Amino acid sequence: MGKPAKIKAGRAGPPPLKDGILYVNAYQEDQMEIYGYAKNKGKEIFMWILYFLTVGLLRLFFFWYPHLMIAATHEESSLKHAVVVVLKDQYNQWFVAKVKFKERNGRDVQNPENGQENKVEVISYKKGNLPNTGTPLKQGDVVREQSLIRFFITKKVKYVWNTSSQEFEKAKGLDHSTRCSYFHEASGLSHLEQSKRRNVYGSNSIQIHVTPIITLLFKEVLSPFYIFQLFSCSLWYADEYYYYASAIVLMSVISITVTIIQTRQMQRALRNTIDSSSIVTVCRGSDEYIEISSEDLVPGDVIEIPRNGCIMQCDAVLVAGNCIVNESMLTGESVPVTKTPLPNPKMSKSQDDIFFNIKEHSRHVLFCGTHIIQTRYYGTHKVRAVVLRTGFTTAKGELVRSIMYPKPVDFKFNRDTYIFVGALAAIAGIGFIYTIVLMVQAGEHPSDIVLRSLDLITIAVPPALPAALTIGIVFAQYRLKKQLVYCISPRSINVSGSINAFCFDKTGTLTEDGLDMHSVVPVENDNLDKEYTDLSKVDNDSFISAMATCHSLTLIEGVLSGDPLDLIMFEATGWELIEEGEDSSKFDMIAPTIVRPKSDESRSFDQHFKPLQKEIGIIRQFTFSSSLQRMSVIVRMLGSPHFDLFAKGAPEKIIQLSKPETVPNDYHDKLMKYTQHGYRVLALAWRQLPAKLKYTKIQRIQREQVEKGLTFLGFLVTENRVKPETTPVITQLRQANIRTVMVTGDNMLTALSVAREIGMVPPKERIVLVQGYPESGKADAYLEFVYAEEYKQDTTKTGSASIEEVTVDILPRDDGNTFHFAIDGRSWSVVRTHFDDLLQKLCVRGTVFARFSPEQKGQLIETLQELGYFVGMCGDGANDCGALKTAHAGISLSEAEASVASPFTSKKPNIECVPTLIREGRAALTTSSGIFKEGRACWQTCMGLFKCAACFSLTEFTSVCILSWISNNLTDFEFLYIDLFVLTTLSISFGATGAYGKLHPEPPLINLFSIGPILTLILQTGIQAAAQVFVYLNVQKQPWFTPFVDNEEDAYESYENASVFLISSYQYIILAIVFSKGRPYRNTMFSNYFFLANIVFCLACTVWLHIKPLEFFREFMELADIPSMEYKLIYLGIVAINFILSFLVESYFCDSYLISRKLQEKIKENFFNSQFKYKALEEEISQSPHWPPVSSTSDLVEVFQRMDSAVSADIDRTSLMSSLADSASETGSLRIKNMESTATLDTQASMATLDTQISTVDDKAQLIEDGVDNPGFEEDQPDIGSYSTTTTNL
């Protein structure tokens, strides 16, 4: 039995902190190690001496590795005294930044005095009674006057020295440690305060620097590749290879020019897309408003949002008025979003004040780069916002930084390439010594010995190798573009060739983006029996009113705009939406949105002031929240003495908020009927609010106070059709052994239905539903595994549907290993919190992940990466941006600006691009050694080009070594013919072969040091060397042969030279044909007409040179004329034998399944015994027939009822705490028994208390506000007297 395998697991997220190492941004995604250095004159002088002695080569080395230069010329010091810092990110990238000083007036200080260095300023905070935190300075706060600001900038982010903590901290905006009350108290900064803050935060601009041409030129010329080119050309000029060297110089100049032009074009395009500024109106206090450039904004400025809209130039918190915003730049979805003011905690008697959290309060934030379409305001009041973040710290700035500093692609093929170049260099070293020995023995001049031996290095290590390896990627990128797949990260193409797991969003990706109205199912006679497709037959006014009002639609330039689902729902009613002017008294409020049935009647009232038609005014919206999974509106009907509330959302959420007696008994059966057939189902509910609840109270009330005790109205059923391209693509990926995973925010049963329909879960394979039950009172959290389909076995069930009374039998799996896990976002949170050891097992077999939030989608991608998968992600851009950035290869189906965060963007709104990408990745990699179809082709292209380049170099190296034996060499024009005419053209045309049309189940090998590539190089080089040695020796036996005589003129024309040159010219063509492999990753070479024409032309020219060249051309080439036609024909026979041997060895030996797969597996098993973690877990699951312990529950209705029963006592506590925190900041009136007073909301500490006290929330107490009478709820209320001494206002 072999030794146990080592587990190879990927890593996601920042690495753990090391002892003794200082960090900035610890535990965050941009975590970096930081080292401080101070000047050392002695080291600097010593290094200058070494620069001189090494003729600048050491300085050139330090140009490539600046962090080593800092270590060599400076001495380590504490950060307090450092003049330069070196940073290392989690991807082992190094950054060097100079520590700078700036005076308070903004003047830069080059060399501060020692006394001044100790007087540095940090971002000032007022320390008050708030525990362990600070609040940014408000107007009038006393600031300790300090003379200097000490900082450095790296990756476009400024880090400021904090004298208290003695460390550098990111210059954060007001999104950290800021109380919500601060934003409402802000009245504008004075010019002096604004100037001081600008010195700390810098200019509010996202500047994309277009690098000057001279700088780009020096960076390009000083790269290792062109330095080697310079060395090679200098050597060739010295050796009088003028023509060849000049041709290489010309090619290099063209290459550098094209690179510089392309770089500047990309920088300009990014700058023109991103960089913008405008004139904004800012408050300077006392209602004084002035206009300034947006570049002068700083956190804390109070700005006015123009009534005709604008493009936001910063992140800002809305404090007055409403805004309708297009956030497509961030979310990829151009649906207008309504932004509402941040709740003001000072509107209540409570002294508690929660911290601002940008995630929880995002619906109150106007993000940089988003388009404000319209503003809504009352009378002449201004729509105001407080600047939160500026520059590169904004949401748009972070997006741009992710483009400028992308996550590096750590790819084994790239690492192996560098190692292989080192191996070629070692071979060149052997040839170097070999040449020196021969030439010394021949008594050659020392200068000739140096030139000839160094020349051999330039042959063995080809200067054009890096360019050759990029050819496959260039052609793959071109082919992807032809198929409307655009790439902003070409390096990701090779990686896409190795992808073995692909995640898909559902709505808009696997299914159609739009929805079709299927039917409505209102509650009638306490059941859901009747389904209506014609709404005119529905006799339920409340149901129709809910459809007409519970939405976020708005009129933009006379066009009804909003969420597609809302549009479909509203248009089905046949009603119309009217947005009145600034003043209307119909509903005792200002500017309501009115909905009413379409009618020709222009009057609203008759002569007795009774309504002529039904009109409803939408008074207040509680916008949709992904955490709450619902939205609601407060409305008032024309002539009605009270307000009403209508709610719409996920059925499982609405049912929790509804009165049990209003929910039909067949609720779960009907819901499953629709969701299992792939329909999207929303639930509607209604509540009449007390008549004493007036408009002013409505505007202050929090949603948790009114979104309860609802009357369930019924279901709204819509159809989200599967795209016709989806099922064939999923089938193709599964046949290629590529895992397909669905991760969606939609309902679990709908997701399962779609997974079955598209073949993501085959018909004969079962789905195990993972249900995670959170802690409830004294009951611990636990997991339950149930089959998603009914299990046909008679079982005895006892007790009711409550959690404590259900008995669960454990059933062994009867389906072998063919099962899939399905888990929803709620259960995912339970697993991550309480069963972390099972998380990776669930991901190995998980196929459907439903009700996942954007953050949870990113967590899933990271977990799969930790398991060792190469993960792709395809989404339509809406809520998928984080996952697209996290994946190895993300494909956005959205054309919005958010797609710049994804390496690939498809103009075709379907997933056909996925196999296309993988194929091209494989083809390009196989070509150079190659996004799903295209990816694997790119891989094969890379592998083939690598083999070609390596064998070309070794073949030419062999030719030179053979000729060196007699002090001969190839002539200048022979080198020119081989390197430019044959090798360059073949390398370029080689990569033009497209991807094979079908994905192969086996991905291409990514290891250059696997047995296949190594055997190929050894055997092919051996065959070519044997053929060259044979013709070299055989030509000497011919009767017309005359030996070469060494001469001072370096005239190399001889029969030995001609025989070796001609056979090698044929061999380059042979190798190109042999390595131009077709199936299973690339098309056949006969589909590449460019390559075929190139082969034919090069072969014809070589045969012409061999058989009967023109006399002047033969002399020009310095090629000896072989007098015997018979020998020339025999020579062609040798070439044919060479081709047959090379082809047979490559196709039937090196590429055979026995060698490339079986032998490789044996070698790996015996010498490199390791495997990825997902494979080890897969084996563990396969060997555990009794895991998972599947419940005997045969009815999914029972399962979901049990889950709802568990959750009703714990209504998504994390989301609720967030919501209650928001609500508390607005009214401060929510009271929960036995919670100690605290200035902050400690969510974890509050959870246990919330479990047992949630039922004690007092409706009347909730509605007691400053100066507001009790609204007089007509419901039975619990007595609040017993709570009076122990309650605490949140």
Image (cartoon, rainbow, N blue to C red):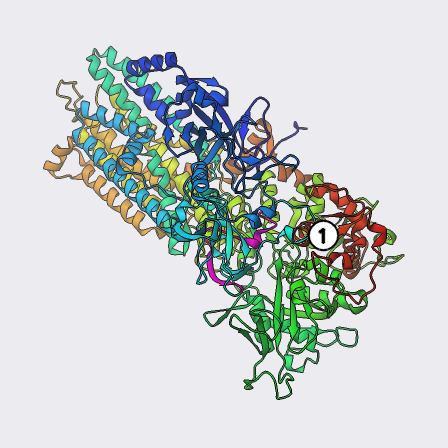
Q: Which amino acid type is marked by label 1?
A: Asp
Where 20 sits versus 1151, above or below? above
Q: Which residue lies under the disc numbered 1?
A: 1212
Q: What range of the chain is rendered magenta? A: 358-378
Asked if residue 1288 lies left or right of residue 289, the reply is right
Q: Position of residue 271 (x, y in %)?
A: 36, 47
**Tag 1 secondary structure:** loop
Q: Position of residue 1059 (x, y in %)?
A: 23, 30
Q: Position of residue 85 (x, y in %)?
A: 45, 25
Residue most toward the front?
286
Q: Quadrant location of residue 27?
A: top right
Q: Position of residue 515 (x, y in %)?
A: 57, 68
The mark total stands at 1
Q: Residue visible at 14% across and 35% down? A: 1114
Residue 367 is a magenta residue:
yes
Check the picture and name the quadrant holding the N terminus.
top right
Residue 1249 is a magenta residue:
no
Asked if residue 74 lies left or right of residue 1246, the reply is left
Where 1023 sits versus 629, above or below? above
Q: Nearer the viewer, residue 762 or 1246?
A: 1246
